[in-house]
Image: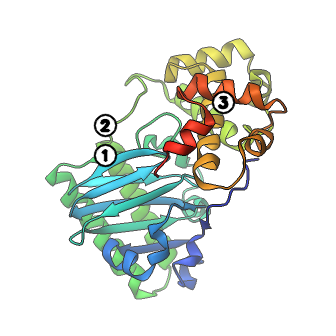
């Protein structure tokens, strides 16, 4: 289970009061969204999936300590738990779409959200840049969804869920940031998504490859082959990457000492944790904290 940190975690019902969607879905223009919720200027996390499209303006979107440029046609994707913030100019416009997994899976039980490449933060880039043609196609669907969202009509949740499915499929077609080989088989893709989900859920308590292999009913050797083939990294490296990310989040946005963070992450030896952090981040925890201006 992932750790509890000091940065706020917002829920969909913090932004929407639409009973017909069970308060599990929200859509708004980006400019209205940031005006209505000024508290979002500080780093924060969501417990839901997020899609943000920019149609005008410039800025920078920072997601888990990586900066990405904002411009017309840029679409960002966030999975639950990712730490993020933005800096935008006054001319920025666009749309935000928030939804809980249960809202999507209610009408699409055979679909797996993590099969969409852009919702895999451990492996893939969290953005795409749409061509003008793709942008207009995307906006057509978003505007239909927006109209339905504002109607409060019969079976509204079903219609919005179908529009959301179309939107995700169109975005998957346009997505160019995948790190996996184009010929990755559906079975291999499904397995690596399962592994990423397990790592996200259990990285705090379980580090050995054997645990994840048992959960997936494969041998540790086979799991390592799956991971290396799909991502170019070993299973151990995937788990370590997630630990380092959590350490950076705590160092940047909590008042815990390095020793306390070490203990929270399951390291009884603070010196060992510091060496581990420096090996993967090229600087000590103290140096990272001092230079962090997220």
Count of labels in the image: 3
Between residue 277 and residue 143, name the one nearer to us.
Answer: 277
Location of mark 3 (residue): 239
Q: Is residue 255 above or below residue 220?
A: below
Alpha-carbon span between mark 1 and mark 3: 26 Å
Q: CA distance from mark 1 to mark 2?
A: 7 Å
The answer for how far apart the CA atoms under marks 2 and 3 are is 25 Å
The residue beneath circle 2 is 176
Going from N to C along the chain, the mark reached first, 2 or 3, is 2
Residue at image point 39% right, 65% down = 163
Residue 212 can be seen in this image: no
Callout 3 environment at 10 Å: few (<14), some (14 to 19), or many (20+)? many
**Residue 175 picture quarter:** top left
Q: Secondary structure at mark 2?
A: loop
User: Nearer the viewer's eye, disc 1 or disc 3?
Assistant: 3
Look at discs 2 and 3 and give the one toward the viewer: 3
Asked whether, in this view, residue 290 is left or right of residue 263, the answer is left
Label 3 residue SS = helix
Give coordinates of residue 118: x percent, y percent.
43, 44
Residue at the spot x=25%, y=64% of the render?
139
Q: Position of residue 102 (x, y in %)?
A: 62, 62
Q: Helix, strand, or loop for circle 1?
A: strand
Name the residue located 52 percent from the left edge and 30 percent from the top edge: 189
Q: Is residue 124 above or below residue 25?
A: above
Circle 1 sits on which residue?
128
Asked if marks 1 and 2 touch (Cβ < 8 Å), the reply is yes
Question: Taking 215 as reference, is 248 left or right?
Answer: left
Rate crowding at label 1 as few (under 14), some (14 to 19) or many (20 or more) other CA atoms within 10 Å.
Answer: some
Going from N to C along the chain, the mark reached first, 1 or 2, is: 1
């Amino acid at each position: 289970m992932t750790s509890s940190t000091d940065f706020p975690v917002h829920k969909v019902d913090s932004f929407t009061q639409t009973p017909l969607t069970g308060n599990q879905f929200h859509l708004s223009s980006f400019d209205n969204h940031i005006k209505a919720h000024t508290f979002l200027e500080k780093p924060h996390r969501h417990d839901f999936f997020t899609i943000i499209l920019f149609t005008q303006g410039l800025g920078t979107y920072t997601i888990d300590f990586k900066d990405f440029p904002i411009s017309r046609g840029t679409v960002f994707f966030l999975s639950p738990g990712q730490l993020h913030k933005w800096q935008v100019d006054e001319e920025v416009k666009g749309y935000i779409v928030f939804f809980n997994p249960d809202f999507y899976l209610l009408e699409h039980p055979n679909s797996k959200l993590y099969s969409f490449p852009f919702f895999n933060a451990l492996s893939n880039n969290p953005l795409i840049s749409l061509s003008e043609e793709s942008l207009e196609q995307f906006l057509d669907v978003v505007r239909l969804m927006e109209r339905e969202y504002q109607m409060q009509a019969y079976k509204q949740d079903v219609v919005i869920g179908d529009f959301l499915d179309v939107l995700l499929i169109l975005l998957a077609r346009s997505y160019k940031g995948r790190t996996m080989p184009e010929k990755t088989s559906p079975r291999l893709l499904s397995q690596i998504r399962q592994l990423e989900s397990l790592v996200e859920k259990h990285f705090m308590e379980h580090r050995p490859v054997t645990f994840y292999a048992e959960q997936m009913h494969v041998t540790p050797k086979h799991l390592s082959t799956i991971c290396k083939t799909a991502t170019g990294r070993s299973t151990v490296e995937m788990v370590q990457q997630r630990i380092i990310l959590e350490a950076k989040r705590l160092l940047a946005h909590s008042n815990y000492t390095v020793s306390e963070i070490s203990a929270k992450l399951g390291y009884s030896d603070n010196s060992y944790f510091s060496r581990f952090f420096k090996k993967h981040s090229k600087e000590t925890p103290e140096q990272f904290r001092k230079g962090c201006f997220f």
